[in-house]
Amino acid sequence: MTAVEIFVPGQARESSADLPDLDSKANIDAMVHGFYRRLLEDPVMAPVFFEVAGIDLNKHLPIICQYWHKMLLGDRAYQRHMMEKHRALDDKLPLTGAHHERWLGHFMANLEGRFAGPNTDRARRLAARIMDNLYLQLQTRRSRVG
C-alpha cells in the first residue's frame, strides 16, 4: 500500500500490518492532507479555518506537515509557535470544547484504517495531549482576561 492510497470506509483490510506507519515524510503528508479533507468537509470546522482564520491551504498545509514531521520524526524545519496562532484565532472566535473534540475526533478517524504502527500510536497520544493543552491554555487565558 502506498502513502497516497485513499482509505474507503467499509473497505476490508486483512490486518493493521498492511497499513503504513507515520514513519516517513510522505506518509505524514498523506495523513495531514487526509485529515484536512475531513476537517474542511465538517460544517462546524470549515468556517473556523476559512471564514475566521482565513487560511490559504497552499500555505497552511506545508506548515502543518512540517509540524508533524517535527513531532514524529524530529525534523527541525518547523520553528513556529503554535499557541500564538491559536490565541489570535481564539480572540476572533472562542474555540470551545466542541471545536477541540471535533478536531480530535477527525484526527483519530483519519488514522483509523489508514495508518498503523508505533509512530501512528504516538501521533494519537500527541494529538490528544496537544488538544488538551491547547484547550486548557485558551480557557485559562480567557478566564484571566474576561
Image (cartoon, helix red, strand yellow):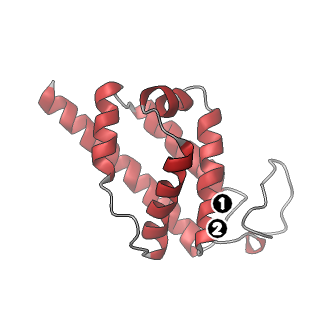
Quarter in which the C terminus is drawn: top left
Q: Label 2 belongs to which residue?
A: 27
Could you say which quadrant of the image residue 113 lies in? bottom right
| Residue located 55% across and 44% down the image | 57
Q: Nearer the viewer, residue 92 or 43?
A: 92
Question: On residue 50, which mark appears?
Answer: none
Question: Which residue occupies 19% across, 36% down?
Answer: 141
**What amino acid does circle 2 point to?**
Asn
Left or right for 29, reference 83: right
- Quadrant into which the N terminus falls: bottom right
Question: Looking at the picture, does residue 58 appear above or below residue 70?
Answer: above
Q: Position of residue 102 (x, y in %)?
A: 52, 37
Q: Is residue 76 visible in the rendered structure shown here?
A: yes
Q: Is residue 28 shown above or below 85?
A: below
Q: Residue at x 51, y 63 (%)?
A: 123
Classed neighbour count for the residue bearing mark 2: other residues with Cα under 10 Å, few (<14), some (14–19), many (≥20) = some
Question: Where is residue 75 shown, x and y percent of the image?
Answer: 43, 74
Residues at badges 1 and 2 in contact (C-beta under 8 Å)?
Answer: yes
Element on which disc 1 rests:
helix
Residue topped by disc 1: 30
Residue appearing at x 65%, y 43% in the figure = 37
Q: Depth check: 57 or 35 in front?
A: 57
Residue 100 lies in what quarter of the image? top left
Q: For the residue marked with disc 1, what is the amino acid?
A: Ala
Q: Residue furthest left?
A: 144
Q: Helix, strand, or loop for circle 2?
A: helix
The mark total stands at: 2
- Residue 34 point in image, percent of width and height: 66, 51
In front of the other: 114 or 89: 89
